[in-house]
Amino acid sequence: MLYLLQWVRITFKIGSPLNLLSLQVIEMKEQRYKIRKPEPNFEQAFQLYGKDEKMMEVVARAQARYLPWDEFRFKDWVPENKEEVWGLVKLVRRFSAVRTPIRDENGKFFTFDPRSHVQFLHQVDLELGGSFLGIEDFSEIDRRRFINRNLIEEAIASSQLEGANTSREVAKKMLKEGGAPRTKSEQMIVNNHQTMQWIESEIKSEDISLEVLQELHRRIARNTIDDKFLGVFRSTFDEHGNKLVIKPWDNETVSYITPSREFVEAEIGRFLKFANDQDGGEFIHPLFKAIMIHFWLALLHPFEDGNGRLARILFYWYMLRKHYWAFSYLSISEKLKKSPTQYAMSFIYSEQDDNDMNYFVWYNVNKIKLARKEFERYVRSKIADNRKKITLIKGDSNLNERQMNLLQYLSKGEQRYTTLSEYMNVNFNIGKVTATVDLRRLVECGFLGKTKKGRNVYYDPTNKVFDLFSR
């Protein structure tokens, strides 16, 4: 109970920066945050395994949410012999544990369960790599618009997770208008946005070499830290001989002590081989592997600052590399930002509870499910809104299907005009007179402007069109 009270007293202000993956220097006399859990009696648990149906149901409920001991012991559906049942939970987890190539500085490998979330993984394969959520009326132009939207949302949320103190509204306006950053927080967001654009447009199909990893760090950290730290592995100690640590809640509670630079240099080659699918290991579903890349980079913490943003960017890089292009639309960091304490604890439980990485995997999968669900809702609402608008405008202005298709095309495409001949070519079954009547009607209704340049006449969409189809 004393431990619980100590945990409750740890205050976390939602509006304050969460420096989960930022390096801070402390005096090593400060106490490190440690989870407390009973040591399971596996011999006793093995004797009980499968013999008590009700007890096994409790174990199944604990597995369904992958509860840690801190939560498990306070559930009203857990019987009084809590430690005994916990031993069964840990036994079941040990049965399903598979060793990963990720290890801590003591040489102990992390484990996870590759057979978990199989139904959702199938859904990911069908809807986030192949057809998009089963939604019709989703064009290539729609894809580009949604990608641009997510790059902005992800850049902002991922930076805010590391302490960027700028409102979403101000940051979105800056990125959309191309404004210059005025503060370190705004610079972090601009850097993140430009780096994600670089990955999406240029290197999503390339391997991540050490040089590319260092360049990614230079891009996300430029003008936010001293130039001498850009793309350079951090030191083990600071100038006072103190180790670098992570403090996710306040300036006192230490959750993680970063490994030595020597360990980082020894492991980074293994990390890159794993990320590039060159380690010769067994198949791991790409979603799990992307989450593991996120975890491993954060565990190594190779750079002075920006490791969190880099870890989350590498998650996207790997999913795009494996052709799960719909992840370009999902801002995972936006969901992580809404539960930062749980995000921090998913790292802590994974490291301190027998190197069981399932805590981190389960947390991220749940946030991905949420991001997918909310984005699907957003897309369907926009499509429904546009259909309503099209129906209304067709009725009010007596426009035909050809004219509505043209307006939609002009509202989304990079080419913001059409000509009579182009309109006829797109609608190959109409003649010059019909095409002329169509365009004249759109001008009369205020949807198109008409400009003559030499012998050519150009029809440009007006603000009325952009207002109508804006997303």
Image: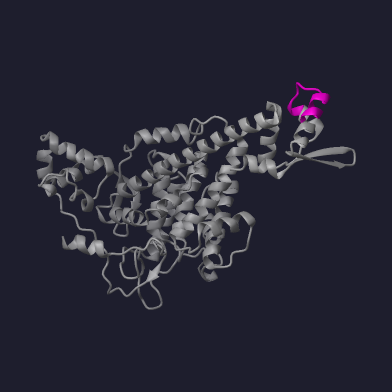
Horizontal and vertical percent for residue 257? 33, 65
Please say if 416 is above or below 21: above
Identify the residue shown where x is 58% and y is 51%: 197
Q: Can you name the residue that lies furthest to the top here?
A: 429
Horizontal and vertical percent for residue 248? 35, 63
Tell me, yes or no, whether the highlighted magenta stretch contains residue 429.
yes
Prevailing secondary structure of the magenta residues: helix
Figure label count: 0
Horizontal and vertical percent for residue 363? 34, 48
Left or right: residue 176 compared with residue 284: right
Left or right: residue 174 compared with residue 76: right
Residue sitting nearer the eye, 353 or 136: 136
Horizontal and vertical percent for residue 19? 40, 63
Left or right: residue 76 compared with residue 200: left
Identify the residue shown where x is 32% and y is 38%: 116
Identify the residue shown where x is 21% and y is 41%: 92
Q: Can I make out residue 215 in this image?
A: no
Residue 237: image quadrant is bottom left
Residue sitting nearer the eye, 10 or 198: 10
Please say if 413 is above or below 14: above
Left or right: residue 265 compared with residue 111: right
Residue sitting nearer the eye, 100 or 451: 451
Q: Which residues are magenta?
A: 425-438
